[in-house]
Image: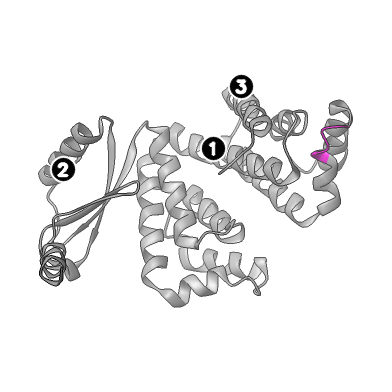
């Protein structure tokens, strides 16, 4: 997510307020996250409302009153408190306000998973969903078809993954489907994997392996990568017999290719050169 300076400051203030709201006893972070994402849907559809709440030249208190008038009784007080912080601050443009609101909605859901001890599981489920979508071009096309109604794509995602993943994972996947922001659905879900890992102060390593790795091998690989990159690594492994043998590891934009297929390709390039 790319934000201009004013929006970055507004997002930082909104995130601080979100932490305060979710810290109150009895507040359900998952419910707040879903409510905030429902407001993202509303602002995405209603252009006039989106412009009104993002109008930095208007009175911040008037913007808060507008949102509360529309949403009071439809979302919880904790969600309204978080929304106060979003619409009460100055954003560079309406799109960035909606992007920021989506970001704190996602954060609330990840905080919910963290508090319930399920963040690891949610991160792994997101990774698996991304690989399923990535591996099925027809599914990727159906979920990302711009001509298809948003609710139809949401229902398709729900039918595919409901009852198979944690409810937090399900909501996050649906969000990646209904608001891709120029990314593939698999790419959007992979972004969520990185956000989940970041909550544990880790970077993500995507690993393709020709064979199943043992727990000991996974631990050693994570430790080795941690030493290479100087930070903790969240390892996500996908079996891929096309690489012949060995591993292909991707961390950010860097690829370490230790596979038989990779070595053969390198040899072919040398011979061709």
Q: Could you tell whether 248 is left or right of 150 in the image? A: left
Question: Is 94 one of the magenta-colored residues?
Answer: no
Question: Who's the residue at 64% across and 39% down the image?
Answer: 100
**Inter-mark Cα distance, 3 to 2:** 38 Å
Q: Position of residue 131 (x, y in %)?
A: 36, 62
Question: Who's the residue at 69% across and 48% down the image?
Answer: 40
Q: Is the N terminus in the top left, top right, bottom left or bottom right quadrant?
A: top right
- Vertical side of 198 occupied by 21: above or below: above
Q: Secondary structure at mark 1?
A: helix
Q: Could you tell whether 32 is left or right of 194 in the image? A: right
Question: Who's the residue at 43% across and 55% down the image?
Answer: 165
Confirm or deny contact between disc 3 and disc 2 (CB under 8 A). Answer: no
Indicate which disc residue 221 carries.
2
- Vertical side of 241 occupied by 118: above or below: above
Question: Who's the residue at 62% across and 45% down the image?
Answer: 34
Bounds of the magenta segment: 53-57
Q: Nearer the viewer, mark 1 or mark 2?
A: 2
Q: Which residue is mark 3?
A: 20
């Amino acid at each position: 997510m790319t934000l201009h300076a004013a929006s970055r400051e507004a997002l930082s203030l909104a995130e601080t307020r979100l932490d305060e709201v979710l810290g109150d006893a009895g507040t359900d972070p998952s419910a707040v996250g879903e409510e905030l994402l429902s407001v993202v849907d509303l602002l995405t559809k209603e252009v006039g409302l989106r412009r009104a709440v993002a109008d930095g030249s208007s009175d911040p208190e008037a913007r808060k009153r507008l949102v509360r008038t529309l949403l009071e009784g439809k979302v919880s007080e904790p969600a309204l408190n978080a929304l106060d912080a979003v619409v009460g601050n100055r954003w560079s443009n309406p799109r960035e306000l909606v992007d920021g609101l989506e970001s704190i909605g996602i954060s609330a859901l990840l905080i919910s998973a963290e508090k319930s001890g399920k963040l690891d599981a949610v991160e792994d489920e997101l990774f698996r969903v991304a690989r399923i979508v990535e591996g099925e071009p027809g599914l990727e096309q159906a979920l990302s078809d711009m001509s298809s109604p948003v609710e139809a794509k949401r229902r398709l995602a729900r039918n595919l993954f409901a009852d198979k993943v944690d409810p937090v994972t399900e909501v996050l996947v649906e969000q990646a489907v209904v608001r891709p922001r120029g990314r593939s659905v698999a790419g959007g879900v992979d972004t969520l994997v990185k956000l989940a890992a970041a909550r544990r102060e880790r970077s993500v390593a995507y690993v393709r392996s020709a064979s199943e790795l043992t727990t000991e091998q996974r631990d050693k690989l994570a430790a080795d990568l941690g030493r290479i990159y100087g930070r903790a690594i969240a390892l996500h492994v996908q079996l891929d017999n096309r690489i012949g043998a060995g591993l292909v590891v991707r961390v950010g934009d860097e690829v370490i290719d230790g596979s038989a297929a990779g070595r053969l390709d390198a040899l072919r390039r040398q011979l061709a050169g």
